Image (spheres, rainbow, N blue to C red):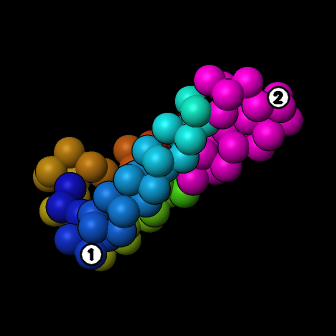
């Protein structure tokens, strides 16, 4: 499944931001920061990762719906994309 280059660029930006957040959490642990602060940051990273997954699949699903025959030929029938989407839900 071919993902729109603009979507890929957006996902890469999001992932770099998440990478920085994860490094921040590592620093918080090294500094022995309060548990509630660390958990808050972990929750933020988790939510951000979910959004990356949903955006990726939404883009793919859009393409599948626009040309279902091509998507199926590439190994991504609509039912498969739906199963992937539900893995994130």
Marks 1/2: CA distance?
37 Å
Question: How many residues crowd mark 2 within 10 Å: few (<14), some (14–19), many (20+)?
Answer: few
Left or right placement of residue 70 versus residue 25 in this view: left
Mark in the foreground, 1 or 2: 2
> Is residue 25 found inside the magenta-colored segment of the image?
no
- Residue that label 1 marks: 6
Q: Which residues are magenta?
A: 28-49
Rendered view: 48 above or below 24: below
Q: Earlier in the sequence, mark 1 or mark 2?
A: 1
Q: Is residue 28 visible?
A: yes
Secondary structure under badge 1? Answer: helix
Screen quadrant of the C terminus: top right
Where does the image place residue 69, in percent across and percent down from the top left?
Answer: 20, 63
Rendered view: 70 above or below 89: below
Secondary structure under badge 2? Answer: helix
Asked if the residues shown at circle 1 and circle 2 are in contact, with their CB atoms under 8 angstroms apart, the answer is no
Q: Residue at x 62, y 42 (%)?
A: 46
- Residue that label 2 marks: 35
Q: Is residue 56 visible?
A: no
> Is residue 32 found inside the magenta-colored segment of the image?
yes
Question: How many residues crowd mark 1 within 10 Å: few (<14), some (14–19), many (20+)?
Answer: few
Where does the image place residue 9, in percent across and percent down from the top left?
Answer: 27, 67
């Amino acid at each position: 499944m071919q993902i729109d280059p603009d979507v890929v660029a957006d996902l890469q930006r999001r992932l770099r931001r998440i990478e920085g957040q994860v490094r921040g959490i590592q620093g918080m642990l090294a500094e022995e920061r309060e548990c509630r602060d660390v958990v808050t940051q972990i929750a933020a990273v988790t939510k951000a990762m979910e959004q990356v997954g949903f955006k990726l699949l939404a883009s793919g699903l859009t393409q599948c719906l626009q040309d279902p025959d091509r998507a199926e030929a590439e190994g991504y029938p609509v039912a498969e994309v739906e199963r992937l989407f539900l893995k994130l839900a």
